[in-house]
Amino acid sequence: MTRKIKHLDLCSEQTNPPPYKVRNGKRINISKNVRGKVVVREPSEITGIGIHQTACVFGPPGASRTLQRHRRALKVPCHALAFRDGTFVTAFPLEWYVYHGNELNAFSLGLEIEGHFAGLPDDPRTPAREDIRTTWKGKATPFDDLAVETAREALRYLVEEGRSRGMPIEWIWAHRQTNGSKPSDPGWAIWKHVVLDYGVPVLGLRTQPDQTWRDGKPIPAQWEPGANGRY
């Protein structure tokens, strides 16, 4: 049974430009600014979705801390963030240029999905644990039914809302396709359950498994039937 997924729109709380984040003592901008103002893209330029995993979990969803957790999305460079507890947050106006995916920034909407997810499933034919070996920065997070439904609803919102604003959204890409240092982004489970089982057949999106930018990596054969990439 499909659960009621909550949408929390925090876009109105963003300043222009939004606050930067700090990583390892360095200031990192989360949007492209010109003369102190965020770059606002033409809707006709936005043709797809860049999909990511956060590679972290934002703490337990305690009743008194839930809104605090969700507000973390305001400092994550993405247009929407799907949390594991049945809530997705839209944190930046869809027209804004946000630094979520390298070469994808100019012409896509960024969707982050909360969790640590394996790059590859375990292959029972081999002694190696491919899932453990390819989990980026920590123990793998189960991609349970609620997390899948939340991610799908966030993707549906971005696609349908974007199209209603004149964005010809047709494609969906993995962050690994434009950043070779993140081969597990978003990981096989997200690609299967959110992209191939939902985004393609339900929302009419298309993948480009062989497409890469700069040092990016193509979609591996373990993620998508017919793909020719190597992990």
Image (spheres, grey):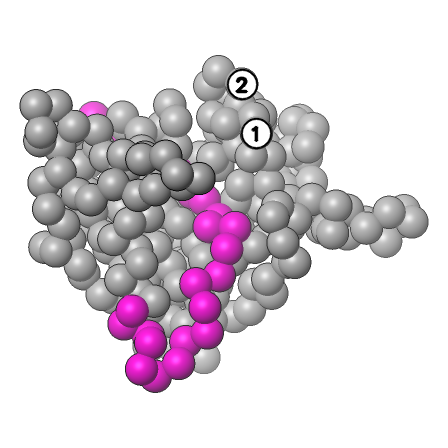
Which label is found at residue 181? 1
Question: Exactly how many numbered labels are in the figure?
Answer: 2
Quadrant of res 64? bottom left
Span shown in magenta:
44-68
Q: Residue at x 55, y 69 (%)?
A: 144
Q: Residues within 10 Å of mark 2 (few under 14, many from 20)?
A: few
When the figure is inspected, residue 180 is found, relative to residue 115, above or below; the finding is: above
Q: Which residue is mark 2?
A: 215
Which is more toward the observer, 53 or 45? 53
Residue 26 colored in magenta in the image: no
Closer to the observer: label 1 or label 2?
1
- Drawn side of residue 79 relative to residue 93, left or right: right
Amino acid found under the numbered disc labelled 2: Asp
Residue 126 at what x, y percent from top left? 90, 47
Q: Could you tell me if residue 21 is visible in this image?
A: yes
- Drawn side of residue 129 relative to residue 91, left or right: right
Which label is found at residue 126? none
Amino acid found under the numbered disc labelled 1: Ser
